[in-house]
């Protein structure tokens, strides 16, 4: 598993579908994950802070904690027919499969680690340096312009196995 970070939440130009770009914490690859609208809205809100109004995804951690457990991380374990398999990791070793959009919404709101299987990165990872020639830390406008060029030609079907 590789540790990932969120790079940018964007709207896919052709499909008008929201997409979260995840990049390796230590490495140069990134992976776009298409999202459902409600989860993209939650992700756009960013990490939850004390005093923020509770969103639907925000109730999970208090319930889990109240039951005496911890939510430790989100993992992307496989890519099957172009669909990510994501799990929530509880108590260090209990994994429950959920939709990738839901997993990311919870991870972003709670500031949880996001991990991705090396196999997924090998299969669909794109070099950040090619998508963002000025680097992932370049001004957002330049990053978005470069990423739009990439997005013009990518569709969810590009991540389906032949």
Image: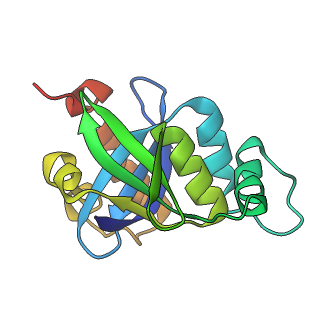
In this image, 3 relative to 92: left or right?
left
Colour logic:
rainbow
**For the point 44% across and 63% down, which residue is it?**
93
Q: Residue 141 appears at what percent x and percent y? A: 47, 57
In this image, 26 relative to 75: left or right?
left
Q: Residue 113 appears at what percent x and percent y? A: 48, 67
Residue closest to the eye, 75 or 104: 75
Can you name the residue that lies furthest to the bottom here?
Answer: 26
Q: Residue 57 appears at what percent x and percent y? A: 70, 46
**For the point 78% across and 46% down, which residue is it?**
55
When asked about the image quadrant of residue 122, the answer is: bottom left
Figure label count: 0
In this image, 104 relative to 78: left or right?
right
Can you name the residue that lies furthest to the front here?
Answer: 68
Q: Give the vertical position of 79 relative to 45 (above or below).
A: above
**Quarter the C terminus occupies:** top left
**For the point 46% across and 60% down, which residue is it?**
6
Residue closest to the eye, 81 or 159: 81
When asked about the image quadrant of residue 46, the answer is: bottom right
Q: Give the vertical position of 3 relative to 160 (above or below).
A: below
Q: Give the vertical position of 138 relative to 10 (above or below).
A: below
**For the point 65% across and 33% down, which residue is it?**
38
Residue closest to the eye, 26 or 126: 26
Q: Residue 151 appears at what percent x and percent y? A: 32, 38
**Quarter the N terminus occupies:** bottom left
In this image, 136 relative to 140: left or right?
left
């Amino acid at each position: 598993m590789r540790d990932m970070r969120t790079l940018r939440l964007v709207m896919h130009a052709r499909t008008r579908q929201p997409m979260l770009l995840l990049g390796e914490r230590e490495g140069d690859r990134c992976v776009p994950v298409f999202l459902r609208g409600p989860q993209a809205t939650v992700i756009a809100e960013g990490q939850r802070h004390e005093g923020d109004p509770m969103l639907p995804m925000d109730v999970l951690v208090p319930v889990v904690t109240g039951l005496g457990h911890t939510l430790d991380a989100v993992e992307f374990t496989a890519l099957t027919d172009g669909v990510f398999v994501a799990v929530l990791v509880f108590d260090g070793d209990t994994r429950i499969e959920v939709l990738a959009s839901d997993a990311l919404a919870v991870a972003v709101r709670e500031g949880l680690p996001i991990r991705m299987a090396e196999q997924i990165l090998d299969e669909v990872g794109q070099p950040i340096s090619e998508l963002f020639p000025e680097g992932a830390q370049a001004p957002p406008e330049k990053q978005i312009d470069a990423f739009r060029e990439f997005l013009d030609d990518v569709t969810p079907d590009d991540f389906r196995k032949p």
